[in-house]
Image (cartoon, rainbow, N blue to C red):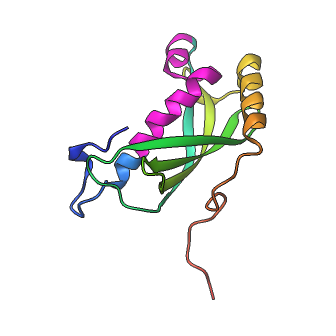
Amino acid sequence: MVVEDGWTDYNGHLNMAWYHVLFDRALDGVLDPLGLGPQVAAADGVSVFTAQAQVHYLRELNAGDRVTVETRLIAHDAKRLHYVQTMRHLDGWAAAISENLILHVDLATRRVTPFSPAVAARIAAAVARHADLPLPEQVGRRVGLSRG
């Protein structure tokens, strides 16, 4: 993906909101094979909502920079999926890390609902395939100042 010209802010670098857009676009490529993409939302009336997201901004990106996003599925249960994404500049360095928890939601009731058995099986298989991949050191960190 490319950082577009209009996405920079008054500091001259990629505005924080656009990191989320790039992470979100990359996630669609992960959700589709699991059976959770936009077509499923339209056809079956279920989708995923983000319950929690934490982004670590590691290096500045500028207009015209090209990036790729790696997604590692960490854990899941009947209704939730925990994952981390690493945004990399095409030169290889990490620009940002995004750790997220998404919920499976029935769009008619707007309530959290279990994944279908087929989707749950695909998620479980993907999480198992990702189990040995390294986790960024930022995963699991909390936000705040140390007290002391």
Q: Is residue 119 left or right of residue 84?
A: right
Q: Is residue 44 visible?
A: yes
**Residue 16, percent from left and from top:** 37, 54
Q: What residue lies at 77% left-to-right and 23% top-to-bottom?
A: 121
Residue 125 drawn at (x, y percent): 77, 28
User: How many tags in the picture?
Assistant: 0
Q: Residue at x 60, y 39 (%)?
A: 102
Quarter residue 25 falls in? top left
- Is 51 magenta? The answer is no
Q: Residue at x 72, y 39 (%)?
A: 130
Given residues 54 and 7, the one toward you in this image is 7
Indicate yes or no whether the magenta region holds residue 40: yes
Toward the front, the furthest residue is 91
Relative side of 141 to 21, left or right: right
Where on the picture, by quarter, is residue 40?
A: top right
Quadrant for the N terminus in the image: top left
Whether residue 77 is situated above or below residue 63 in the rendered picture: above
In the image, residue 13 above or below residue 51: below
Give the answer, above or below, for where 1 lies relative to 113: below
Judged left or right of residue 145, residue 137 is: right
> Which sits in the foreground, 131 or 43?
131
The residue nearer to you, when weighing 64 against 123, is: 64
Image quarter of the C terminus: bottom right
Q: Main secondary structure of the magenta part?
A: helix
Q: Which residues are magenta?
A: 20-43
105 to the left or right of 59: right
Q: Residue furthest top?
A: 43
User: Picture coordinates of residue 54 (x, y %)?
Assistant: 54, 55
**Is residue 47 something that shows in the picture?**
no
**Which corner quadrant of the image does residue 77 belong to?**
top right
